[in-house]
Image (cartoon, rainbow, N blue to C red):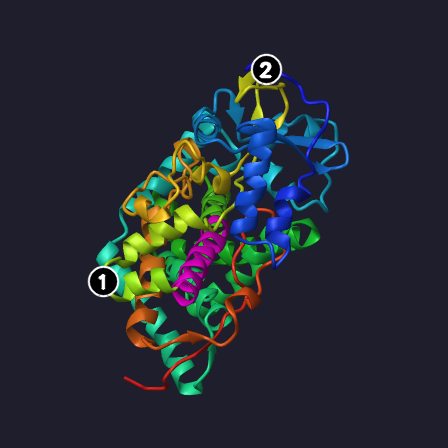
């Protein structure tokens, strides 16, 4: 196909409505992606706001090219022509993700490698067995509370609490700090003025904790980051912690809630899971393929003119890698999603230099959350029809249930 510049554009709303509208889920997303693919091919034009254009990398191969090749597609927002021209304003949801900070998330090349390596080294020192026991304890405590009340919302009373309480434990923080960080992290992902408030609130909590760990070192992630020579000062330690907290929180909440909802609403999936034909690991991978917790990841910015999927991407253009579309690329998947069981080639953890650094801890958290419900609430059922389950409306990337009222047999163990 000859590279071309489109004469018309598809509004970003065609895709983000899949996040914002509670009735546009799953099948609708596939329909929209199929329509865009038929009209434009694996790379489609879009619009963030009037005059702010971008591209969606929807093909699996094109998605992979964008996220793996930082020499052509930069993560640094300073390379976006819209930023250079002052068209990305602080009240836009995208603003926090294209504002350059001193961490591996916002940078490329040697600086990214220096700032990312300490995170990888610190995470490699986590005792996975001990950590899994901590997370199971958190999950069991939350289920105990639900059983005492005799009713529950599996999102608000359970799923949204687990990730940051678990991450707080990994950093050596208490439950009260974990809950305040959870609220601050959610503000950051909402964008606009709330995002700036959230970053400040997170920074205050983290700076206090870093100072405490400098006085009283422990065998936890915070102390390991402080001790790593790759991070040159407390600001870089703080930035590393903020990245892990923000990126991990929403992704993990989304994965837990999507898995639990599929378990409670899809009889075939639930039957295979409860009957032992599908273990928890396979169930999580199935969710990653079929209904990924993150629809679109942060944009990349072309450092030169380049052809991608038959389209001409100009220097300074933004390209949004679309996980939901790439995972369901017809060239990669068949008509029967059950044939994909055991296939871990999905892009829900991303890949390349900016792949999720905490995939193992996040997986441990999701596994514990799902297993605890299976074991402690074996007869749990939705208290509302599945199509009435409310979903979040304040994120351009994450789409997951915000409320999941359930019924269960009240038995204390």
Locate residue 151 relative to residue 392 in the image: left or right.
Answer: left
- Residue 276's label in the rendered image is 1
Residue 126 covered by magenta stretch: no
Circle 1 packing at 10 Å, graded few (<14), some (14-19), many (20+), is: few
Q: Which residues are magenta?
A: 246-266
Give 259 or 315, whichever is nearer the viewer: 259
**Residue 392 placement: quadrant:** bottom right
- Residue 192's label in the rendered image is none
What residue would you read off at disc 2?
3
Q: Position of residue 220 (x, y in %)?
A: 32, 55
Can residue 176 be seen in this snapshot?
yes
Report helix, strand or loop for mark 2.
loop
Q: Position of residue 129 (x, y in %)?
A: 22, 58
Q: CA distance from mark 2 to mark 1?
A: 49 Å
Locate residue 304 relative to residue 223 in the image: left or right.
Answer: right
Q: Who comes first in sequence, dot 2 or dot 1?
A: 2
Instruction: Give above or below for 297 relative to 251.
Output: above
Residue 252 covered by magenta stretch: yes
Q: How many marks?
A: 2
Q: Position of residue 41 (x, y in %)?
A: 55, 27
Q: Position of residue 14 (x, y in %)?
A: 65, 43
Dominant secondary structure, magenta: helix
């Amino acid at each position: 196909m000859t590279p071309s510049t489109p004469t018309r554009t598809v509004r970003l709303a065609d895709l983000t409505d899949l996040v914002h509208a509670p009735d546009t889920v799953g099948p609708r997303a596939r329909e929209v992606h199929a329509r865009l693919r038929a009209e434009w091919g694996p790379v489609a034009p879009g619009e963030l706001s009037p005059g702010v254009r971008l591209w969606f990398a929807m093909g699996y191969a094109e998605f992979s090219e964008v996220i793996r090749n930082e020499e052509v597609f930069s993560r640094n927002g300073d390379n976006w022509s819209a930023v250079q021209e002052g068209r990305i304003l602080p009240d836009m949801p995208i603003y926090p993700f294209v504002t350059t900070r001193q961490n591996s998330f916002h940078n490329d090349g040697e600086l990214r490698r220096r700032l990312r390596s300490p995170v990888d080294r610190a995470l490699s020192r986590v005792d996975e067995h001990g950590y899994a026991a901590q997370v199971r304890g958190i999950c069991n405590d939350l289920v105990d509370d639900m059983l005492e009340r005799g009713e529950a919302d599996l999102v608000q009373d359970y799923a949204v609490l687990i990730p940051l309480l678990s991450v707080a434990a990994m950093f050596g923080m208490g439950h009260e700090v974990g809950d305040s960080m959870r609220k601050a992290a959610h503000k950051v992902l909402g964008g606009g003025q709330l995002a700036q408030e959230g970053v400040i609130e997170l920074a205050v909590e983290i700076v206090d904790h870093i100072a405490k760990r400098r006085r009283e070192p422990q065998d936890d992630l915070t102390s390991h980051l402080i001790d790593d020579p790759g991070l040159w000062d407390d600001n870089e330690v703080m930035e590393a912690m903020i990245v892990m907290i923000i990126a991990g929180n929403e992704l993990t909440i989304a994965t837990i809630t999507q898995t639990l909802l599929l378990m409670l609403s899809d009889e075939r999936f639930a039957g295979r899971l409860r009957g032992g034909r599908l273990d928890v690991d396979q169930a999580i991978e199935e969710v990653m393929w079929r209904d990924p917790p993150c629809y679109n990841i942060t944009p990349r910015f072309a450092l030169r003119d380049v052809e991608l999927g038959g389209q001409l991407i100009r220097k300074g253009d933004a390209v949004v890698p679309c996980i939901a579309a790439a995972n369901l690329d017809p060239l990669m998947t068949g008509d029967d999603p059950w044939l994909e069981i055991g296939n871990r080639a999905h892009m829900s953890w991303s890949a390349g230099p900016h792949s999720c650094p905490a995939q193992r801890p996040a997986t441990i958290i999701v596994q514990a959350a799902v297993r605890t419900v299976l074991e402690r609430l074996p007869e749990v059922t939705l208290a509302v029809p599945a199509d009435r389950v409310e979903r979040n409306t304040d994120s351009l990337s994450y789409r997951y249930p915000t409320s999941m009222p359930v019924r269960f047999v009240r038995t204390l163990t």
